[in-house]
Image (tube, coloured by chain):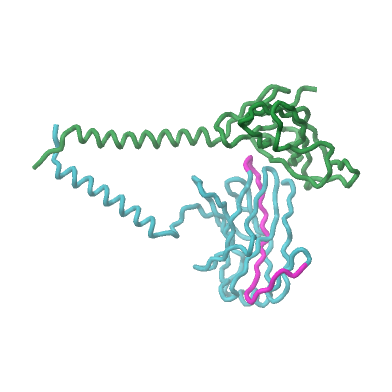
Chain colours: A cyan, B green
Amino acid sequence: MRVARSKAVGVLAAVVLVALSAIGLRLSDPEEQKFEVINGVVGQPVRVNDGEVSVTQVSVGSVLKQFGQIQDSTDGMFVAIRVTGAATGPRPLELNAARLLSGDVRYEGYQLSSGVSAEPGFQTTTDVVFEVAPALIDDLTLEIGSNEVLHGYQQRVRIMLGITPANAEQWRTAAKGLIEPINNTTRAIP
Amino acid sequence: MRLLPLRRILFVVAAFAVVLIYLIWWVSYAGIHYTARYTIRSPGASGEVQGTTVRVLSLTRSDQLADAEEGEPDLPYPGAVWVVAELEALRHDPAKEYYCGAQLIGPERRLWSTSSSPTKRAMQSCPLDLVVGQPVRFEAIYMVPARYADQIGGIALSDSSTAARVPVITPPPG
C-alpha cells in the first residue's frame, strides 16, 4: 500500500511548523502564568495545598532594627509583612518564596528574608521584609509560593496590603521611623 | 506523484509509539517511586536502611527535655510535646553509610524530622561514623503537636537514594 508522498510531507511539515510555533510562543513569553493564583486579603487565612497562610500586619519604616541593634537604613522604605503559615494537612507547608508586586514592579525579599514554612500540625509566624521605592507602592501585593524547581502544580497566594494610590502618601509619611521585625515564632496549630 | 512505502510509514508510527510508551512508563515509574511507601514492622522488630539494622528500644513522650548537667529543661513550642526515641543501630555493610534518616511518622503519614535542643543530654544523638559490627545506642528527639502525640506510628527509616519501601519501626510492647 502506498500513499502520496507529497501529501504526507505536507502534513508532516505542517505538524513541525505548528510545534515550532508553540515552542517559540512559549519561549518568547517568560511571564506566562504557569501557576494558579489564589487571592486573599489582610486578616483572612487563605487556603493553599498544604495549609493556610495569612497576613495580619503591615508595618513600614526607613530604619531597620533587628536583634536589638540598628541593622540598616534606607532612602526608600522598608515594608515588614507579618505572615503566618499553618501546615494544616499531612504535608509540611513550604511557602519559601515571597515577593512584592506593584503593577509591573517586582520587589524580592530584603537580604535573606523569604517566606514561611511549617512542619505538619505547626504554624509559624514571621515578618517578611522588603525594601521598596516609596514612589512605587500603589496596590502593593504580597505574592508568596513555593520555590520548587520541579513541580506539577504550583499555587501562589496574592494578598493586597491595602496600600492604594489614595492612601500611599500616608504610608510614605509613616515610613520615616524605625521598624523592628519579629523573629520566627512557632506553635502547634490551636 | 510518488508514493511512500508502507514500511516507512510503519517505521514512523513505531517511533512515535516508542516515545509514547517511554512517557507512559516514566510517568508511572515517577508516580510509584517518588511517593514514599511504608512497611510497618511488628513491635520491637528492626528495620534495614543503608546497610544498617536499626531498632527502637523506647519511645517516650515528655513535656520538657531534661538537661543532664542540671541546666534548665528545654520546653517545646506552645501546644507541642517532645517525643524521644531511643534507638540502636548496627552497621553491617562497610560499603554503605547510615545517614541517620529517622523521621517520626504520625496519622495520615505526617512526618516530623529530628529537632535539636540546647540541653546537654545523657545519651548521644545519632553518630554519623558507625563502626561496622559494633552496635550503637543513641536518641532522636522530635517535637510534635500534642494532639498527635498519641497517634505516633513509629520511626520511618527514610533513605532518599532508594525507591524501596520505607521501614517503619516501633518499640517492643510493654
A188 sits to left or right of A145:
right
| Quarter residue A44 falls in | bottom right
Q: Position of residue A53 (x, y in %)?
A: 63, 53
Report the span colored magenta.
Answer: A69-91
Q: Position of residue B54 (x, y in %)?
A: 70, 28
Is A51 a magenta residue?
Answer: no
| Quarter residue A132 falls in | bottom right
Most prominent secondary structure in the magenta stretch? strand
Does B76 appear above or below B126? Answer: below
Camera-nearest residue between A13 and A134: A13
Residue lying farthest right? B70
B15 sits to left or right of A78:
left
- Residue at 80% over, 33% down: B60
Q: Position of residue B56 (x, y in %)?
A: 74, 28
Is A76 a magenta residue?
Answer: yes
- Residue at 52% over, 33% down: B33
